[in-house]
């Protein structure tokens, strides 16, 4: 079936060699690619998600969570390097999937990558807003009004005030979008400077904070489980791994810039594996110090250190270093900016590749005549990311980003096995050792972390995929470069069947999760379970919609 037609490797390699007015410039060396990876990795993950995972799920065991996440990333990272050095073209996992598993899987992974890059940028922009507020409080003695730096779904427990929209998050997204439109080389140079600053600051925090570690805070590394899965104990450590996994999304963002690398065969392995190894060690040390300075309970969702956790720990427990809280807040804001920059860069390049393949409108692949960047894609991306950053809480956005990234890693790992079977003789500047063992281990570890993220994130992922099937039926099916009018009806019916099956899966997941409370939920509206009602309505509407689409394309 043409849904599984693959984009030939020869065609991909030919695209990688293209030059001219409508192509991307090759301006990034190995050092810039390494800095690009570190720039994306060290950010909201280390400064925000560490405290969130420790306070709500893993306690000091967040150190083990980082080790688990790092192992999964190492396996997936090896797979990314083989693809990125073999297929040095923009698009990352989307492009690799198109070459190995066909158009349908490529669309699914391309749509899923929005969860990784776009929502990743939104999550960090929200964290940027939190630390900007802390900076204003520390140096200028005021805070941004709650309603203008939080989403409508958040409320201040003390005053009862609800958020309206997160304006600072929108502001930083707008500024960095303009920088990206200006040019990739300029963006990379700015990123390299920021990387040096934030790495130095993290190292200083580890060195100074080590002397303020309270042994009692590490007396119990893994707090006992509360009786609920994912709430401390080993299940909490696994849940924590899924949460802090967000911190690792940066290393694969390097692969989206492969078409702009001067020597991708050399630069991709250095950029991806080098940044991953460096940051994993840094993360483990950082989480050890942070949970040693302050008790993990203070970082819980109801704790005083829930927002801007690092600045909180310094100002409350590192006596004599209160000045450092302001300095590290500035460094964190710079660090967050570089992460957002790389996430926006990665997503715009995925949009660029999908549009060139006809799966998205052509405007997403139009290159600015002067700056040689996908300017229109960047502008559309700002609107999408801005909507999430302004109106959705950071913890929800972060978890959606983690599960989207894990799903992408699973498919890339599977793609290496498939490509070794389908294209065994293709030159590979870098080869994953011990295939299929390494890719299978990558799939297994990432799968366990997906499991640990819990039902709500599974359902959000399935709902997101359903929206993707909607768009594929409406636009991509007819406009793909591989489109064939003779088989369009058959392809449409197949997608409709997949959509029907996915809708049923989402319904069953929801009913099973809420089984013991179904009578109560169906008899009265409980605003605390609004997600249940949303998922039920969403699933039923898609069941009806895909059913109509299937019979319509059958001519019934």
Image (tube, rainbow, N blue to C red):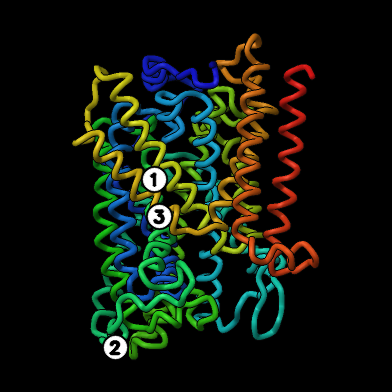
Per the model, the C-alpha gap separating discs 2 and 3 is 29 Å
Circle 1 — which element?
helix
Which residue is label 1 attached to? Answer: 188
**Label pair 2/3, CB-CB below 8 angstroms:** no
Do labels 1 and 2 touch, CB within 8 Å?
A: no
What residue occupies the far top of the structure in this picture? 486
Q: Is residue 158 left or right of residue 106?
A: right
Give the vertical position of 254 relative to 12 (above or below).
Answer: below
Residue at the spot x=40%, y=50% of the render?
249
Q: Earlier in the sequence, mark 2 or mark 3?
A: 2
Up-down: is 513 above or below 103?
below
Would residue 362 be visible to someone looking at this image?
no
Residue found 36% across the figure and 34% down from its top? 414
* Relative vertical location of residue 501 with respect to residue 54 in this rendering, above or below: above
- SS state under label 3: helix
Nearer to us: label 1 or label 2 = 2
Task: Please report whichever mark, 1 or 3, sits nearer to the chain's N-terminal start.
Answer: 1
Frontmost of labels 1 and 3 is 3
Residue 448 percent location from the top left of the image: 38, 53
State the image quarter where residue 517 is shown. bottom right
Which mark is drawn over residue 449? Answer: 3
Q: How many residues crowd around disc 2 within 10 Å: few (fewer than 14), some, or many (20 or more)? A: few
Q: Residue at x 29, y 37 (%)?
A: 81
Quarter of the image that includes the C terminus:
top right
Label 2: element kind: helix
Residue located beneath label 2 in the image: 216
Q: Residues within 10 Å of mark 1 (few under 14, many from 20)?
A: many
The x and y percentages for residue 150 are 64, 68
């Amino acid at each position: 079936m043409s849904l599984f037609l693959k984009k030939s490797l020869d065609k991909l390699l030919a695209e990688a060699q293209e030059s001219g007015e409508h192509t991307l410039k090759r301006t990034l060396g190995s050092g810039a690619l390494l800095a690009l990876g570190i720039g994306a990795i060290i950010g909201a993950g280390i400064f925000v998600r560490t405290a969130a995972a420790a306070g709500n799920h893993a306690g000091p065991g967040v150190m083990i969570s980082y080790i688990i996440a790092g192992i999964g990333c190492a396996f997936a990272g090896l797979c990314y390097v083989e693809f990125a050095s073999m297929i040095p073209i923009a698009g990352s996992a989307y492009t690799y999937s198109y070459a190995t598993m066909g158009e349908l899987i490529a669309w699914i992974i391309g749509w899923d990558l929005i969860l990784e890059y776009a929502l990743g940028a939104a999550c960090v922009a929200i964290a940027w807003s939190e630390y900007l507020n802390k900076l204003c409080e520390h140096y200028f003695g005021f805070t941004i009004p709650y309603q203008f730096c939080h989403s409508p779904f958040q409320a201040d427990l003390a005053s009862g005030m609800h958020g309206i929209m997160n304006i600072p998050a929108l502001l930083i997204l707008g500024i960095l979008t303009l920088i990206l439109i200006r040019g990739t080389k300029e963006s990379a140079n700015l990123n390299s400077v920021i990387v040096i600053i934030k790495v130095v600051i993290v190292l200083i925090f580890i060195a100074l904070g080590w002397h303020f570690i309270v042994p009692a805070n590490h007396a119990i590394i893994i707090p006992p489980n509360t009786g609920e899965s994912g709430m401390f104990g080993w299940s909490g450590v696994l849940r924590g791994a899924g949460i802090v996994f967000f911190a690792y999304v940066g290393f694969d963002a390097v692969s989206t810039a492969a078409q702009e690398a001067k020597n991708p065969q050399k630069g991709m392995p250095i950029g991806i594996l080098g940044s991953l190894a460096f940051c994993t060690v840094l993360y483990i040390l950082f989480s050890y110090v942070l949970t040693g300075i302050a008790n993990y309970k203070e970082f819980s969702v109801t704790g005083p250190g829930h927002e801007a956790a690092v600045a909180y720990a310094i100002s409350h427990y590192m006596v004599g270093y209160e000045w450092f809280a302001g300095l590290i807040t500035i460094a964190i804001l710079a660090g967050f900016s570089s992460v957002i920059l790389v996430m926006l860069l990665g997503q715009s390049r995925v949009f660029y590749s999908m549009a060139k393949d006809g799966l998205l409108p052509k405007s997403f692949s139009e290159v600015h005549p002067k700056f040689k960047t996908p300017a229109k894609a960047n502008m559309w991306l700002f609107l999408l990311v801005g909507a999430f950053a302004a109106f959705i809480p950071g913890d929800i956005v972060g978890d959606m980003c983690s599960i989207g990234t894990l799903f992408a890693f699973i498919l890339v790992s599977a793609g290496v096995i498939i490509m070794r079977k389908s294209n065994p003789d293709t030159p590979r500047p870098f080869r994953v050792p011990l295939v299929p063992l390494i890719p299978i281990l990558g799939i297994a570890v990432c799968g366990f972390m997906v499991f640990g993220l819990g039902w709500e994130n599974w359902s959000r992922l399935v709902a997101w995929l359903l929206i993707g099937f909607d768009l594929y039926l409406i636009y991509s099916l007819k406009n793909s470069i591989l489109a064939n009018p003779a088989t369009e009806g058959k392809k449409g019916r197949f997608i409709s069947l997949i959509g029907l099956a996915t809708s049923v899966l989402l319904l069953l997941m929801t009913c099973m999760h809420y089984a013991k409370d179904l009578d109560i939920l169906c008899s009265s509206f409980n605003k605390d379970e609004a997600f249940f009602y949303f998922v039920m309505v969403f699933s039923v509407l898609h069941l009806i919609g895909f059913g109509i689409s299937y019979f319509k394309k059958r001519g019934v």
